[in-house]
């Protein structure tokens, strides 16, 4: 028994190891080559919105240094790179004729990945909505979903990519962008938030249909940040609160995509707070439930709630205080999705940890806490797969240190250290550890 416990966890030979990034967090060059302004450019310009007044104006300068970054991916032996396309680079105003220089940048990126034997996975929307669309109502305006489908079609036709993700974390847009005001566009209004929620999901469905119609054989799905939700104590009130929270965290996004309906209890709660139900038109749920080919699963933290529905932290918290370190939650959510929403392969598209990193005198970045986090979460993934979860790939968040939204540059999630003054890249110890895991397919 001890021997079995000490033997390495071996992943299937065809398991895919990768890393993820997002355009606004790494590209910089926010005013170059015809790129239009996004809601995040606008949000960052308001004093007090972002820590230290930071913005993505320069970020990790990936727009100019992408070849160096692609070499890093190849040197780490990774087989997949999940990145996002900046909508304002492709359509500076969110509609109309595409900006050729924007398309050319992503063509060079995809070609560079192909030259290095790395498969691309592209996210169409990672929160950088063109500001002009926001000025016309943003995600509260149904027309934005139609514009998104047109933008998606441009990208599909221009780029040779098999695997696509539609919307990154619609829940974060809804919660942080519209309910709590901590992200762009910076609203605090439940009524508006859930109207935006429906239109984000509608955009996902419309874009998925376009891909299936125009490019059969390619794959598409959403990237959902799923939070397994647990009662913080063994009382009926806590169990009921956990079920309610699960509706807002998970079922609100999974049910319409997989089952063609919103969860009744959650929709009832939302309808007491705003007009979302009035915006669900005939046929919408049929569009939203367009069959997906893959599900992007993003996991960082569980949510424990007490009988009053208040969040309770039961385990160690990270530098990012919302992040409670609980690897078992990844196992639980993967097994639960396989059980409740079967039939679609899952790809872990984000999982990672921000730590306070620095370069030691010998040039190394000793981020042992991140290594322990990744090891524990990969072990949880392996156990979920042994329990039947259909997981085909894992992407660490993130390849590079980057602009961490409202936290600016104060939190480093990368496995590669970025000196923002010089833009020098230094693989951390976690990158070298991850390289060895990817090469061997074994977790020791």
Image (tube, rainbow, N blue to C red):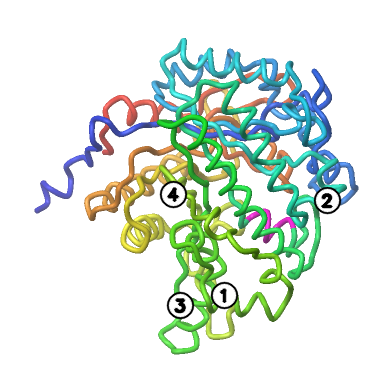
User: Of callouts 4 and 2, which one flags the residue occurring earlier in the amino acid sequence?
Assistant: 2
Residue closest to the eye, 346 or 176: 346
- Of badges 4 and 1, nearer the viewer stands 4
User: Of callouts 2 and 3, which one flags the residue occurring earlier in the amino acid sequence?
Assistant: 2
Q: Position of residue 322 (x, y in %)?
A: 60, 59
Question: Which residue lies under the disc numbered 3?
Answer: 231
Q: Residue at x 52, y 46 (%)?
A: 223
User: Of callouts 3 and 1, which one flags the residue occurring earlier in the amino acid sequence?
Assistant: 3
Q: Which residues are magenta?
A: 172-177
Vertical placement of residue 159 versus 319, above or below: above
Query: At numbered mark 1, what does the secondary structure look like: helix, strand or loop?
Result: helix
Contact, CB < 8 Å: mark 4 with mark 3?
A: no
Q: Residue at x 55, y 53 (%)?
A: 287
Residue 159: in magenta span? no
Residue closest to the eye, 110 or 44: 110
Q: Position of residue 323 (x, y in %)?
A: 55, 56
User: Of callouts 4 and 1, which one flags the residue occurring earlier in the amino acid sequence?
Assistant: 1
In the figure, residue 28 lies in which quadrant? top right
Query: At numbered mark 4, what does the secondary structure look like: helix, strand or loop?
Result: loop
In the picture as drawn, the residue positioned furthest to the bottom comes out as: 236
- Which numbered tag is attached to residue 49? 2
Question: Which residue lies under the disc numbered 1?
Answer: 266
- Label 4, label 2: how far apart the Cα atoms are: 38 Å
Contact, CB < 8 Å: mark 1 with mark 2?
A: no
């Amino acid at each position: 028994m001890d021997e079995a416990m000490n033997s390495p966890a071996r992943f299937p030979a065809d398991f895919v190891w990768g890393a993820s990034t997002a355009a606004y967090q790494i590209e910089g060059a926010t005013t170059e080559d015809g790129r239009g302004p996004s809601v995040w450019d606008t949000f960052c310009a308001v004093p007090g919105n972002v820590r230290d007044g930071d913005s993505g104006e320069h970020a990790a300068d990936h727009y100019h240094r992408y070849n160096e970054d692609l070499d890093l991916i190849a040197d780490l032996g990774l087989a997949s790179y999940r990145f996002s396309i900046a909508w304002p680079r492709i359509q500076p105003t969110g509609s109309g004729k595409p900006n050729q220089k924007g398309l050319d940048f992503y063509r060079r990126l995809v070609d560079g990945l192909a030259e290095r034997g790395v498969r691309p996975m592209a996210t169409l929307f990672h929160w950088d909505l063109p500001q002009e669309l926001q000025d016309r109502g943003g995600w509260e305006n149904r027309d934005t979903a139609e514009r998104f489908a047109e933008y998606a079609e441009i990208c599909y036709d221009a780029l040779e990519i098999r695997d696509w993700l539609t919307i990154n974390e619609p829940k974060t847009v809804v919660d942080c962008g519209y309910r709590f005001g901590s992200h762009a566009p910076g609203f605090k209004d439940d009524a508006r938030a859930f109207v935006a929620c429906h239109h984000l999901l509608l955009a996902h469905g419309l874009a998925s249909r376009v891909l299936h119609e125009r490019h059969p054989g390619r794959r598409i799905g959403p990237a959902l940040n799923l939070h397994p939700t647990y009662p913080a104590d063994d009382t009926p009130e806590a169990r009921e609160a956990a079920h309610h929270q699960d509706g807002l965290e998970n079922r609100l996004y999974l049910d319409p995509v997989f089952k063609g309906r919103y969860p009744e209890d959650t929709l009832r709660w939302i309808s007491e707070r705003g007009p979302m139900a009035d915006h669900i038109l005939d046929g919408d749920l049929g569009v939203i439930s367009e069959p997906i080919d893959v599900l992007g699963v993003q996991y960082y933290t569980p949510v424990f709630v007490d009988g009053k529905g208040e969040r309770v932290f039961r385990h160690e918290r990270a530098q990012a205080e919302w992040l409670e370190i609980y690897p078992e939650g990844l196992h639980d959510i993967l097994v639960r999705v396989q059980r409740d929403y079967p039939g679609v392969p899952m790809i872990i598209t984000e999982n990672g940890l921000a730590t306070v990193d620095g370069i030691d005198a010998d040039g190394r970045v000793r981020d042992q806490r991140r290594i322990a986090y990744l090891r524990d979460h990969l072990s949880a993934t392996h156990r979920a797969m042994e329990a039947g979860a259909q997981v085909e790939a894992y992407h660490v968040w993130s390849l590079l240190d980057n602009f961490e939204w409202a936290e600016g540059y104060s939190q480093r999630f990368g496995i590669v250290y970025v000196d923002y003054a010089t833009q020098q890249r230094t693989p951390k110890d976690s990158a070298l550890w991850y390289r060895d895991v990817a090469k061997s397919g074994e977790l020791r």
